[in-house]
Amino acid sequence: MRLYSVFLRHQLTWGRAAVIAGLGALAVLIGLTITLQSTEKVVDGTEFINGFGFTVVVPVAALMFASAVLGDTVDDRTLVYLWLSPVPRLQVAVAATLASITIALPLVFVPLVIAAAATGAGPALVGATAVATIVGVIGYCGAFVALGLRFRRALVWGIAYILLWEGFVATASETAAKLSLRAYTSSLLSQFTGVGLRLGTLTVGSAVVVPLVVCVLATLLTARLLGRADID
Amino acid sequence: MTAPVAAAPAPGVSGFGPGAPMVEVEGCTRWFGDVVAVSEVSFSLPAGVTALLGPNGAGKSTLLRLLCGLVAPARGTVRVLGRDPRTDLLVKGLIGLVPQQETVFDRLTALEFVEMCALLRGVEDPRAAAEHALSIVELDPGDTRWLPTYSRGMRQRVKVAQAIVHRPQVLVLDEPLTGLDPRQRRHMTDLFHALGRDGLCVIVSSHVLEEVERFGSNVLVIVQGRLAAEGDFRAIRDLMDDRPHRIRLRTDQPHALSGALLADGTIVGLDVVGSDTVIVETTRVSELRVGVTKVAADLDVHLWEVVPLDDDLDSVFRYLVGR
């Protein structure tokens, strides 16, 4: 619990919170614009939430917080104080992942759900956005905590994954799409609203379960990396 | 001074009575890329204070990181209290480390930071232990300022407090006196000695010879990743028979005395540096110490002073590093 609270304090900075809050406010504004101008609110609203909320806001928020939770302790060399504690590495990894989810989730959940409601597309989009945000944040946070521990420039690697892999490679083949978390959030939106989306072809069950499994596996990987890392 | 923190009895770790090695390093090698940081190092340390000495880049910090399990040896073994510090969680809780880096968690007070370390290491009453540890290093537990606002010396003392808060059995200190004023340096040196007397194995690294001399005579000298010498530095000096000892004699007849010593083979060189002083060189220092008074008596000369010039740590270190 104490480790969890230390991670919470360590990663939440005004700069990061301002960036995510700004993106969230932008999402709400665009949502309002859609409801005022669109004649196909369900289609336009779903495509907007998918194209902006789950392509930019959710992965970027998760990347900023999750990659920092252990990555910052590597960079400023405070990891040594945590590492020397007789606490199982899995506990450290779980605390770090939970802390990043705790911060990232409310920061993106509230504005994205409001933005979805503001589009006027109806309760299906609002519900899909809520579920997909929770699932997406959990999946991305698990993966990006491990990324932050493994790589010094985790933000660059994370952005590269979001832009190159999820933006281009995942669209090229079905197999690559399954290795992209965005495919699962898109599928939830598509299945709930009935709007056809690129990458949105997976079932609701797999779209919910796979990101959670990704988070669990990534947390195990983080624990393993912690055990094998050279600590400065 | 507040009573220092005595080592906690460690469940599951036993058999480390007086003189028994608490730290054992056997054939340890570690490299980073093409750079060999530590090469084939072996030693063992009992309770007490041992100074780890070496020039910058000699491999001191890597050796300390190996002792704490922060890095794994590429070859060889490290045992702390009979266990592997890299993988054994139990022994991690029995090691206290003052790392070289100055950074600490930047949004915590000193008390919160030390309390967090105590809690993570399983201390029963972490708040009380943290307050006690901070008072030992003469910091105010009630200070509500965040750590980045502390001076360098205060942060250094906070690092020492977190290293002793859980009553470790092995205390590893990497340049612990950096940034401290002379009074605090003295206070910390006294603290480390007190902990050593209480049965802790205290390992202190430094490249400042004056500091090391204050930590005591037991040293490990590391040069270019290799262990150049270990033990009492005066004994190390005595063993360096390829380097003649230099001894200053003050006498009313320096020429006569040194001439007699040269004639009987006790000294191998001499340098008369004044009307009453001669510096002699000898490879038979024990014989000189015993015999010089007899020679002086036989010659009926006054002998006022016999001062060894190069059995201090500085000389030993220069000889070892310069080899």
Image (tube, coloured by chain):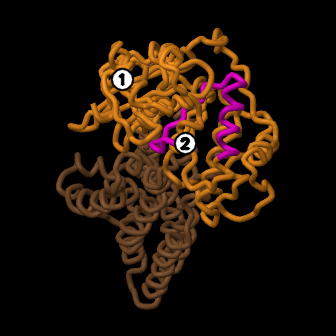
Percent from the top left, x then y, of residue A2? 68, 46
Q: Write down the quadrant of residue A222 in the picture.
A: top left
Residue B240 part of the magenta-drawn span: no
Q: Which residue is mark 1?
A: B259
In the image: residue A151, left or right of residue B22: left
Residue B207 part of the magenta-drawn span: yes
Do the residues at discs 2 and 1 belong to one chain? yes
Image: B27 above or below B118: above
Q: What secondary structure is marked by label 1?
A: helix
Percent from the top left, x then y, of residue A232? 43, 44
Q: Which sits earlier in the primary sequence, circle 2 or circle 1?
A: 2
Looking at the image, which residue is at 47% across and 55% down? A76
Percent from the top left, x then y, of residue B294? 52, 14
Q: What secondary structure is marked by label 2?
A: helix
Looking at the image, which residue is at 81% across and 58% down? B142
Which image quarter holds the C terminus of chain B? top left
Looking at the image, which residue is at 59% across and 29% down? B202
Residue B139 visible in this rendered orientation of the protein: yes
Percent from the top left, x then y, of residue A193? 43, 65
Q: Write down the quadrant of residue B283 in the picture.
A: top left
Q: Looking at this rendering, what residue extends furthest in the top direction?
A: B15
Image: B85 above or below A51: above
Image: B113 above or below A92: below
Spatial CA span between label 2 and label 1: 39 Å
Which chain does tag 2 point to? B
Image colour for chain A is: brown
Q: Amino acid at mark 2?
A: Glu
Q: Which residue is mark 2?
A: B211
Magenta region, residue range: B186-211
Q: Write down the quadrant of residue A10 in the picture.
A: bottom right
